[in-house]
Image: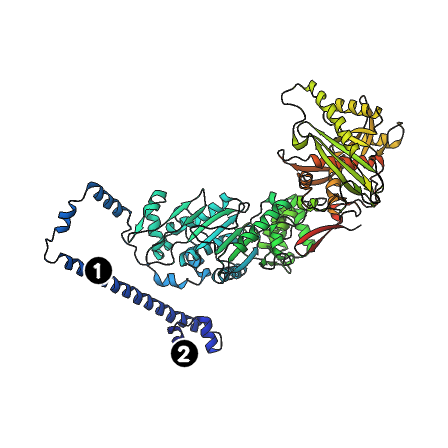
Amino acid sequence: MAEQLDQIKALAAQGVNLRDAEAVIGRAFTPEEVQSFRKIATLRRLRRSAEAQEAARKRRLALEAEQKANLEAQLAGTDPDWASKIRGPKSALDRQHEHRARGRELRSIPPPRRRRVRERYRFDLLGFGLAYGVGKYEGMKPLLKRPPSLRMVRFVRALQEKILHGGLKHVRWPRGKGKSTWVKIAILWAALYGHKFFMVVVEKTKGMAQVVVEEIWKRIYLSPRISVDFPEFAVPMRDVELSPQRMRSQTYHGKPTYMKQDIVKFCYYKLPTVDGFPQTGAIIAFRGADQALRGINIESARPDFFFIDDPCSDTDAKNPATCDKIEDNINGAVLGSGEINERISAVMASTAIEPDDVSERFADPAKHPEWQTETERLVTTFGPQEMVSKYLKLAEIDEAQAHEWYAANQAAIEVGVEMMDDRDFVEGVECSAYEHALYLLHTMKPTRFYSEYQMAPSRSQGIYKISPKMIRERLNGHPMGEVPHECDQGVLAFCDVNAVAGLRWEICAFGKGRVTATLAYGQYPANGERLYPKGIPKSAIPDYLAPAIRTVAEVIMGVELKDELGEPVKVRGICFDGGWMTECVASTVADLYAGGLNCSWSKGYNSKEYSRYHHEAAASGKIKGLKAAEECHTWATANGTYLAFNSDYWKEVSQTSYLADPLSRSSSSFFGTDKLTHHQFAQEICNEELKAKDKSTKYGHVYTWAKDPSRPNHFGDVHAGVLVYGAIRGNFDRIAAVIKAESLVKVAKHRKVRYVYKG
């Protein structure tokens, strides 16, 4: 053993690293051998550093001596004051420049006070965090409140590996468990030791990312421990006192330090570049996840490390189009921003929110095999379910009583329990981390708890996800105006009447099993122009609206339609929306009907306003001439008989019809083969998003929709209207199982997701 120890010391003295030394010996070193190896290696590095400094000092002295000798040779035999006589006395401007230069110059940078401590953590991120991430100073709280758990240590080791050797790491941890804190420490460590020179912090918004980078910046010169161990960073930063002007003019050995804070244009902080310290000068940029990340280039440098922290907000996670954008943004930035000859490093820390959000997508190895994903849950294993249910029921009545019951039955309720960290509880208030987890389950909605703490997001019942990209790709391949053979139950048209957007219309063919196909659509006036001039009195609007309705009716009836055999097909009826300017719409429709055109008008009501009484009265057949269908009925008024319908219900039917494959049961599809042709139609379908669907004894289902007033949903109303018109006419038949969100099966195919209906 003594011979091997001498051999180990010899390898350390020769500069062999630890792994290679273990390979030479043929076994892993014991802790005592590792300590001896590192001691010898550290002494070797210190000796070589001292030798390099001594060599540099000798070269500087030799250069000064040579310059002095040359100057003496020039002045030999001449007046010693010849230079001043030729140039004359220094001007006030020269003296002022020299005075300012002396003011800008850093006098000296002291050596590290604890050089051994500093070198000890050069390749030890965990030790660095424990040594420099604690302590409160200058009003800043410590980064670490307690030592990390065993699971966190694994993450820190993996983080160190990615920074030193490259690679992509995705960490999915419960909210508030310290993943972001350790990445801040990692950025600080990489910048101070020079492991990385261009790092980018990506948060939900640019402002949040700036807060992270600013905290890292301030800790470098405010932390007493970092200040004494890394003076080449702390001294220049303290000297300028965060003044941008002083940063631009600061010099050391006559050379600028190039320190900079650009928080508006290019959004980055640049640490000082100090002559004689090659590890200085790191750049830390910040960006929002919705900003352009591809092709970042600052001072002819490209990023070598990305830290992406929870790139998706709650709102973004519920919007597939936004998730698509963020996913593409991260992919392009991380995989395409590094240098050609270097392997990019990136760490993403995320918490799941929705089943198909950004976190879930990058955790799927089928979609992103290049990312190594690590998922941790607050509760790894739950205890007996009946005990959990008992605690939750007691907590609903009295939380204090629930705590007493838990304390009395702690051993039974924690049978088989495994927690991420057994220290996660409030001492003196809770018995254990498991009780804290159950308390969170009680106070939060289960959906949110399982999403944010168990990494198992679930969608509320009845809630579905659609995106413009998915809808516009629902193409049946038939040319415009051609009726597919699956749609043999007639053709109808619907026109939405709007005060600002004018008239939007759609011609739709119907088939058995609720199959629909859009044959043609359009708007009047064209190009989104207003229907009538601004500022005219309401009484004058019919002068513009009535001719527009007649024009649209002529356009619809003039569209050339045919089946697959080339036989002509006619529109069997047109329905106009009468929710706005009802009297004008009703009277114009009556005139068109009298002229031989089969047309009617309609009005939609939300689920709370839709009249169940009128629906039952129409369905009973007691009132002649009225009829009822699926969530709709006809009703007689002073303006004539019209179609009333539950707009909330039919908007859901309309949107979910695009989840099925084209020309299959309960499906809607577009004509053509170009996936970009129907983008506007698809976008307006998605501009109204279903947020909640609750059961009410009085109203049936009650819907909550999210709608941005600046984003129109006119074609969404048009498609819902044509479906309800088909229902009252008998073309859109009621099938045994109406498509619903719980009937959808998510099928992953390569990197695309499609939805199919399983009847």
Q: Residues within 10 Å of mark 1 (few under 14, many from 20)?
A: few
12 relative position to 657: left or right: left
Label 1: element kind: helix
Q: Quadrant of the N terminus?
A: bottom left
Question: CB atoms at circles 1 and 2 under 8 Å apart?
Answer: no
Q: What's the residue type where badge 1 is placed?
A: Glu
In this view, the mark in front (1 or 2) = 1
Q: What's the residue type where badge 2 is placed?
A: Gln
* Residue 344: % across, % down: 51, 58
Q: Residues within 10 Å of mark 2 (few under 14, many from 20)?
A: some
In this picture, is 252 found above or below 150?
Answer: above
Can residue 649 be spotted in the picture? no
Q: Residue at x 59, y 47 (%)?
A: 325
Can residue 651 be spotted in the picture? yes
Q: Which mark is residue 742?
A: none
Q: Which mark is residue 7?
A: 2
Label 2: element kind: helix
* Residue 550: % across, % down: 76, 26
Q: Residue at x 44, y 74 (%)?
A: 21
18 relative position to 576: left or right: left
* Residue 35: % across, % down: 41, 70
* Residue 645: % across, % down: 78, 33
Question: Which callout, 1 or 2, points at the residue further toward the start of the chain?
Answer: 2
Residue named by callout 1: 64
